[in-house]
Image (cartoon, rainbow, N blue to C red):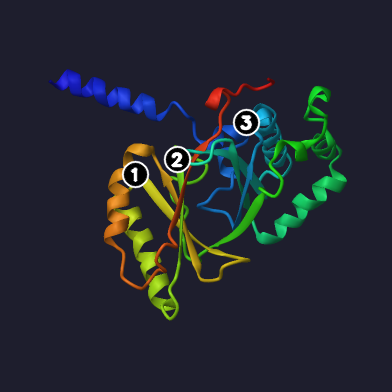
Amino acid sequence: MTDTFTESAGTAERRSRIVPPASHQAEPAAPESLLHSGNSGAMVRKSGQLRSEFRNEGRMFAREVAKHVNSQQAGRASAFVYEESFGYEDRIHFLIHLDALDVYYDLVEMGDRDRAFRESIAKERVGEDTGGGAWDRLFVDGSVHSTVLLPWTGQAGPQLNSASAGIVLLRSARIGHGFAAEGRELAREIADTVNERYAGEAAVTLFDEAFGDAERVHWAIGLKDLTVYGRLRADLAAQGRPGTFVDGSVRETALTPHHWGLYATRQGQ
């Protein structure tokens, strides 16, 4: 019986490592130079829907851009690429972590000052047999969306975060009218509960929207793997309080770090 249990546990551990964490996308960068959901001064969540016919070219473009940011802005910005674990196929997500919000200007200036980056953006991504074109042909028109998130003060960088987690769960909710204080208190309680009960399995950082819905709170939850989600979801539901969050406003998106081979994509294809 002991041997069988040990083998099963080992199998589960191997399965949880099939998809490497997002930090592998920044190799060989030093781990201490990586910015992530637990230590960044701002996080930009950007997503875009790839056209199915360009799913490989789109992923290559996404990884190429992230790699360039990570190499040229080490210590100031880190960018990771994710797939939706469940939901829309071929929807690509970037989490761009900034040391401070004003680092965004450095990223904008890369388009003017960084010749290699400029050439990468202008590069022909689509073959002439399909009409030709650069990166803009890869995405469905109007599908690229960005949200700027600012972390709550006083947060320690959790061990599991957007760089180290097997799954990143982005959860948000809109605070009900007149419940601003109660909503923020509950958001903090939920984060504290997860960090205490799931040490080593899940960890939370809280964010506000810098621009957009001022009453929406965001939890960035780093999960060791999907096996944690079932227990975690039950705990999250148990902590709800009527009226605190607007009915139907809770949103969840699970993100899997992209790696070559996921959804049959290959580097250089």
Q: Residue at x 60, y 33 (%)?
A: 25
Q: Amino acid at mark 3?
A: Pro
Q: Could you tell which of marks 3 and 1 lies nearer the N-terminus?
A: 3
Which residue position holds label 1?
229
**Left or right: 11 in relation to 125:** left
Q: Nearer the viewer, residue 173 or 137?
A: 137
Residue 188 place in picture, x, y as percent: 39, 65
Marks 1/2: CA–CA distance? 9 Å
> Do residues under tags 1 and 2 come within 8 Å of each other at their CB atoms?
yes
Q: Residue furthest bottom?
A: 178
Residue drawn at 72 percent across, 37 percent down: 68
Q: Amino acid at mark 2?
A: Ile
For residue 156, above or below residue 96 = below
**Residue beneath label 3, please?**
28
Marks 3 and 1: CB-CB under 8 Å?
no
Estimate the spatial distance between the alpha carbons at disc 3 and disc 2, rounded to whole Å: 22 Å
Q: Which mark is residue 65?
A: none
* Mark 3 / mark 2, whichever is N-terminal: 3
Residue 122: percent from left, percent from top? 84, 37
Residue at the spot 40% in from the left edge and 68% down from the top edge: 245
Q: Quadrant of the C terminus?
A: top right
Compared with 180, 107 (above or below) is: above
The residue at the point 66 percent across, 48 percent down is: 143
Q: Secondary structure at mark 1?
A: helix
- Quarter of the rendering containing residue 148: bottom right
How many angstroms separate mark 3 from mark 1 (CA)?
Answer: 30 Å
Question: Which quadrant would the N terminus be assigned to in this image?
Answer: top left
Residue 167: image tag: 2
Residue 132 horizontal/vertical position (percent):
83, 29
